[in-house]
Image: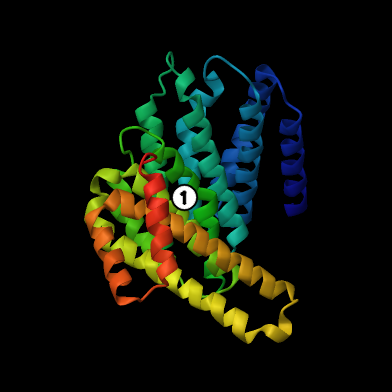
Amino acid sequence: QPIRMNAAVIIFCLVYRDIDKLTSCGKAFSYTLPVMLSLMDDVRSINQALGALMLLSFVEASSRIENNEIPSFIENSSSIITKSLENAIQLSSRQDATFLTTICLAQSEWLRLLFNWIPLASKSSLRPTTVHAWMSKAASDNLVAVRKQVQMGGKDKNDELIVGALVAGIDPLLADLASLPNAATIEIARVGLSAILPLIGWRGMSMESRSIQIAALAGLLSLLSGAYPIMTHHGTKIMTEVLILLDRSDKDAIFMRDNDQADKSSDKLRNDELSTESVVSVALHAAAATLVICDKGADTVLSHVQKHGTLQYKRVSQIRNVGEKLQNYY
């Protein structure tokens, strides 16, 4: 039975791959929606992931089709699919990062599809505020779940679960919410910071650890932009966490350079070096954005660090230089 189920899902996904007309997409969707929902509502994580995979195929097909209004089959099913995805993430086992990542990706891609259809929804009962509320709730719920995982530390492949939820689910939603003109992430800013700041300080030099740090910094940038009116109250702690990560990454780079000369050609070492360089680049940008948006609190921390020499002087100069370039952007 599992083999037949997998084969059926693959066939459904292949059908969506070749669809290029709205009527064909709607017909295929009407056939597959009951199966999709049944799978996502199942208690087994693998079936939830299979249902999410079918939804991803549908979203990809729908995004290729040009239309001047939101299709009725998307509008009519928007609420039930959104709720089903929410339940699937809550039920999903935390033992397999691949399954959870697939469901998180399906959720974010589905909500982003609705988000992109909003300009065409003038005659629709689906309102922009409803979609924005769904996105905000999904991001908030996933941030709370990640915060609980942080308390467990990096054991039992927990780091893979965290980075999957961040990259596939949380970061895309925060980025879209940050693009709205009304500071749409203010309501979830505190929840977001309580989850993201500990992840910026995540320990380790593995690819998973570096991925968590970079994904957390990306989420922070979205929060800074999307909740800018209240971020001045958090500038001190944000800048502190980012500078600690920057300082630790610089020291990690020195450690790798001085202690791994004999293994300089290994792929692992090269990957570690590249991932550390990437963390430094993103952290510099995040520190500069924090300086611009959070103003005095962030500047006080940076000035203290500059005065006492607890960070490489060139890093302080880089942060201030990048900050000057970001003034017009923020």
| x and y percentages locating residue 61 in the rendered image | 66, 30
Badge 1 density bin: few <14, some 14–19, many ≥20, Cα 10 Å: many
| x and y percentages locating residue 252 in the rendered image | 53, 77
Question: Which image quarter holds the C terminus?
Answer: top left
| Quadrant of res 327 | top left
28 or 107: nearer the eye?
Answer: 107
Q: Judging from the image, what secondary structure is the residue with disc 1 in?
A: helix
The residue carrying mark 1 is 170
Instruction: Identify the residue at image location x=76%, y=36%.
Output: 14
91 or 145: nearer the eye?
Answer: 145
127 or 95: nearer the eye?
Answer: 127
Does residue 41 appear left or right of residue 231 in this picture?
A: right
| Quadrant of res 20 | top right
Q: Amino acid at mark 1?
A: Ile
Instruction: Identify the residue at image location x=66%, y=24%.
Output: 25
| x and y percentages locating residue 197 in the rendered image | 37, 63
Instruction: Identify the residue at image location x=73%, y=36%.
Output: 12
28 or 199: nearer the eye?
Answer: 199
Q: Please give the count of numbered marks on the rendered protein.
A: 1
Q: Above or below — where is 75 with respect to 148? A: above
| x and y percentages locating residue 127 in the rendered image | 38, 24
Does residue 241 appear left or right of residue 160 in this picture?
A: left
Q: Is residue 143 visible?
A: no
